[in-house]
């Protein structure tokens, strides 16, 4: 098995995807759950990229269930699971389920008699860094941006240590107009860390203080309202890469905002991921690491970079290489970010960099990272 030495995690490696959903049901809710599952199964069967799914019940504990599904690749699954249609499809299950846990895996090798992956199409294993990355995004009422930034910058950081194997490593928070993006890095169990943070009094106080300013209403004391809000706010990491060379001193973190044309968000995320893979192999690139987050027509690229962004605007934006500016231009909703016209001119590239660069609100690293 070939293993790449560079740290790289990606939804765009071309492998089939295995999704595992563990569920703990309330006693007496099995029939209601089965009826909700049947509705979901019929809908998901028509989703492009879906191959199959299975529903399993524990032989040791009847309240524990397992849903597995197989997809042609990660992008069609992510498009489905992050859609409004998915939110509504799974809503009937909420009252049946005490707890859930979702896991997603690339299928690298397979044994058995059916459709064994040919050696020529085997996917190379990648090297990770033991860190899970995730982001949340939501919008606030226009005119409230400065107050929201003050609230988000002023809270006390929660305890970094979650348990013996899990800890918070870094939280980076940015704004673009009235949109908030909060990115977290977790060593160990991401779900355990998110739940740990949500239970902290200082965090709950800030979240409650934010409620009047949110464009989407939520009630964090209502499990269903909170679940729907955080499902809609999820901004998954679809690609992460770190250059194989030692990290230089003075790295600076920036978040860049790329609104995509309708239905083109996944293509835009894939383009940026490919560009950052190439940058990781370029010893002269100022971009040392990158994480691309994507949901619907929103793409956010979090980069750690040497020097100022405008020292090399093309590299900072992920446009190195012949024709890449034109590719981005075809996918980007330039009007939404205030940049219209060709990205082949220095003026428009600099304008895009200025408009895409998100306002940093806070960037906190745990003391022992």
Image: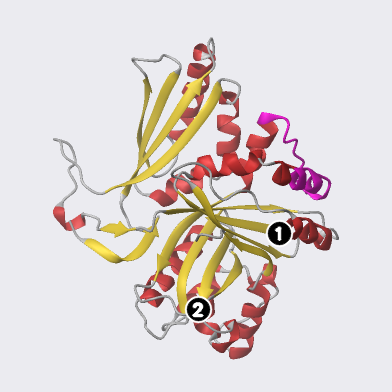
Question: Whole-percent x and y of residue 65?
Answer: 42, 22
User: Which residue has dot 2 on it?
Assistant: 326
Question: Whole-percent x and y of residue 190?
Answer: 49, 45
Left or right: 367 with respect to 66? Answer: right
Question: Whole-percent x and y of residue 144?
Answer: 84, 58
> In the structure shown, which secondary structural element does the residue marked by tag 2 occupy?
helix
In the rendered image, the residue lying farthest to the right is: 143
Question: Whole-percent x and y of residue 33?
Answer: 51, 18
Q: Which residues are magenta?
A: 205-223
> In the structure shown, which secondary structural element does the residue marked by tag 1 occupy?
strand
Q: Is residue 133 above or below residue 309?
A: above
Q: Is residue 196 above or below residue 269?
A: above
The answer to whether one can see residue 248 in this image is yes
Left or right: 83 with respect to 280? Answer: right
Q: Classify the position of the N terminus by image quarter.
A: bottom left
Q: Which mark is residue 351?
A: none
User: Which residue has dot 1 on it?
Assistant: 179
């Amino acid at each position: 098995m070939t293993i790449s030495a560079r740290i790289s995690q990606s939804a765009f490696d071309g492998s089939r995807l295995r999704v595992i959903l563990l569920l703990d049901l309330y006693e007496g809710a099995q029939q209601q759950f089965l009826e909700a599952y049947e509705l979901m199964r019929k809908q998901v069967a028509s989703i492009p990229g879906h191959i199959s799914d299975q529903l399993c019940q524990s032989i040791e504990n009847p309240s524990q269930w397992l849903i597995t599904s197989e997809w042609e690749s990660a992008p069609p699954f992510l498009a489905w699971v992050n859609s409004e249609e998915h939110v509504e499809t799974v809503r009937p299950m909420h009252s049946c389920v005490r707890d859930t846990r979702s896991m997603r895996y690339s299928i690298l090798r397979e044994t058995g008699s059916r459709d064994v992956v040919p050696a020529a199409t085997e996917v190379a294993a990648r090297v990770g860094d033991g860190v899970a990355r995730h982001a949340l995004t939501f919008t606030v009422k226009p005119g409230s941006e400065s107050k929201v930034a003050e609230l988000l910058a002023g809270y006390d950081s929660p305890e970094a240590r979650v348990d013996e194997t899990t800890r918070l490593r870094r939280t980076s928070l940015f704004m673009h107009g009235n949109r908030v993006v909060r990115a977290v890095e977790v060593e160990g169990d991401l779900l355990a860390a998110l739940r740990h943070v949500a239970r902290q009094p200082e965090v709950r106080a800030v979240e409650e203080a934010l409620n009047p300013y949110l464009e989407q209403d939520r009630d964090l004391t209502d499990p269903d309202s909170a679940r729907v809000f955080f499902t809609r706010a999820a901004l998954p990491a679809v690609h992460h890469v770190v250059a194989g060379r030692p990290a230089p001193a003075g790295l600076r973190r920036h978040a860049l905002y790329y609104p995509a044309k309708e239905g083109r968000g996944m293509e835009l995320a894939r383009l940026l991921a490919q560009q950052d893979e190439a940058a990781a192999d370029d010893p002269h690139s100022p971009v040392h690491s990158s994480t691309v987050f994507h949901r619907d027509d929103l793409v956010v690229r979090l980069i750690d970079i040497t020097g100022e962004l405008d020292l090399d605007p093309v590299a900072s934006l992920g446009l190195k290489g012949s024709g890449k500016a034109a590719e981005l231009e075809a996918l980007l909703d330039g009007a939404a970010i205030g940049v219209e016209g060709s990205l082949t001119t220095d003026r428009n590239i600099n304008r895009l960099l200025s408009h895409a660069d998100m306002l940093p609100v806070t960037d906190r690293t745990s003391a022992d990272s």
